[in-house]
Amino acid sequence: MLNVIVVGAGIAGLSAAIALRRAGHCVHVYERSALNNEIGAAINVPPNAARFLLAWGLDPARWRFIPSRRVSYLDPFTLEPLGNIPARPSPRSIGGCELYYTHRVDLHNALKWMATREDGPGTPVTVHLKASVVGYDSSKPSIVLQGGQEIVGDVVIGADGVHSQASEAIVGRGNDPVQPIHYNSCYRFLIPASVLEEDAETRFWNEGADGWGRLFIDYSTRRRLVTYPCRNNTIYNFVGIFYDENMKTDDGENWQRSVDIAQVLNEFSDFNPKLLKIISPSDIEKRLEIYNQLRWKRATAIQILSMAGLEQSELVRDDLAGVLERDEVPMDLHALYKFTFAFNIVDASLSAMREYDPNFRLPSDFFERDVADVPGQ
Ligand SMILES: Cc1cc2nc3c(=O)[nH]c(=O)nc-3n(C[C@H](O)[C@H](O)[C@H](O)COP(=O)(O)OP(=O)(O)OC[C@H]3O[C@@H](n4cnc5c(N)ncnc54)[C@H](O)[C@@H]3O)c2cc1C
C-alpha cells in the first residue's frame, strides 16, 4: 500500500483518488478551496469516461445525468437543419456506453462521494480542504502547504488544474495553452426549462428536448451557439462560441469571469428572433422595479395618513412632506378623499409599462368589464 498525495480535488484529482483507493492505497487529497462553492455549467461525460465511472458504480440516474439522445445541426437564421453534415453515430454504437450530459457540479459531487464513501472498497479518501499547496520536493517526494507544513508521501500527483504549478515544479515546464485559431471566445450560461415553459413564445424549446443537443452554426462568421440539457432535463446549458479579433492575448483566462447578457445578445443579434428570445433574460427585475416605483410613494403616504383620523391629516402633514411633493400633500378632507379614491392604478401602471415597452398590452380578457374612469379626468 502506498501513501499517495493528490494535489487538487477537481475532476482529475478525485478520479485519480477513486482509482487509487480502489487499488488499495491510502490517499490524501489537498484542495485549496473549501469546495463549498463549486461552479460550472454542463459537461459531457462521453463513453470513454463513462466506461470506468459506471464500472466503479456511478449511478447516472442518482446524479441526474442524462444520456444524449440526438444531436441536430441547425441554421441559426432559419432554424432549419443544416445540409451536408453526416448524422452523428450513436455514442453507444461507437464507444460501448452512453454519452451523458451532466452538470459539472453533479459530476463533481458524484466523484467526491465515490472517493470518500465509507462503504466502498479500500480506505475512504481523506480530502483536506482549504489546504493550499505552495511547494513541491520531487526527491522525497513531498508537498508544502501554505503555512509551511511539509507532507511526505510515496507518490505525489499534481491534479491542480489547467494552470498547474505542480507541472512547473515537478516536470520543470508549465502547461502552456495552445493558441486558439478558429474560435477563441465563448460565453456559457444556463437557462432553467421551467423559465422557458412559463412563456408562450419560448415553450416550444422544451418540446422533445430530452437529451437533445442543438448546434446553431453560422460558418461564414465563425459563430456557433451550442445547447443541450443537463440535470434531468431541468436546465439547458448554452455555449456561444465565436472568434474575436481583440481577444488575442491570454489576459487571465478563467471560468468565473462574468459578462453582461447584453454583450452575449449583441454577439448573436442577427440570429433568428425565436432563438434570441430563448436566450434573452426575463425582464422580471425591471418590471418589479417599475412596480416599486408606482407603489412605494403612494403606499408610504397612505400608511402615514392611517396614523391619524381622516379629518386630522394636518397632524401628519410634516411626515407626508418627506414622501410627497409639496403640491401633492392633501390639505383638506376633500383633497384627502381625492388622493385616496381618485387614484387610477390601471392608468398609472399602463402608462409606466408603455414608457418601458411601447408595445405593452394587457391580455384582452384581463378585465371582464370596462374600467371605471375617475370623474373629471
Ligand atoms: C470552476 C470551473 C468551471 C468549469 N466549468 C466547466 C463547464 O461548465 N463545462 C465544461 O465542459 N468544462 C468546465 N470546466 C472545465 C473542466 O471542468 C475541466 O476541464 C476539468 O475540471 C479539468 O479537471 P481538473 O481536475 O484537471 O482541473 P480543475 O477542475 O481545475 O481542478 C483543479 C483543482 O485543484 C485545485 N488547486 C489548484 N491549485 C491548487 C493548489 N496549489 N493547492 C491545492 N489545490 C489546488 C483547484 O482549486 C481545483 O479544485 C470548468 C473548470 C473549472 C475549474
Image (cartoon, grey):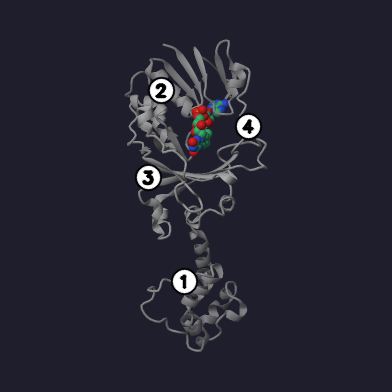
Q: Amino acid at mark 3?
A: Asn
Label disc, if present, on residue 233 of the rendered structure? 3
- Of residues 354 and 6, the one drawn nearer to the viewer in this rendering: 354
Q: Amino acid at mark 1?
A: Arg
* Mark earlier in primary sequence (1, 2): 2
* Mark earlier in primary sequence (2, 4): 2
Q: Residue at x 59, y 72 (%)?
A: 322
* Mark earlier in primary sequence (2, 3): 2
Whether the residue carrying mark 4 lies under 8 Å from ligand 1 is answered with no
Give neighbour class at mark 2: few <14, some 14-19, many 20+ (Cα, 10 Å): many
Q: Residue at x 44, y 71 (%)?
A: 362
Q: Amino acid at mark 4?
A: Gln
Picture quarter with the N terminus? top left
Of circles 2 and 4, which is in front?
4
From this view, report whether residue 375 is shown above or below residue 229: below
- Direction bottom: furthest residue: 376
Residue at the disc numbered 2: 18
Residue at the disc numbered 4: 179
* Mark earlier in primary sequence (1, 3): 3
Q: Residue at x 56, y 18 (%)?
A: 143
The image shows residue 248 at horizontal and vertical percentages of 67, 38
The Cα atoms of the two marked residues, 1 and 3, are separated by 33 Å
Picture quarter containing residue 21? Answer: top left
Q: Amino acid at mark 2?
A: Ile
The Cα atoms of the two marked residues, 2 and 4, are separated by 33 Å
Give neighbour class at mark 3: few <14, some 14-19, many 20+ (Cα, 10 Å): many
Assign a secondary structure to mark 4. Answer: loop
Give neighbour class at mark 4: few <14, some 14-19, many 20+ (Cα, 10 Å): few
Residue at the disc numbered 1: 361
Assign a secondary structure to mark 2. Answer: helix
The Cα atoms of the two marked residues, 4 and 1, are separated by 50 Å
Picture quarter containing residue 160? Answer: top right
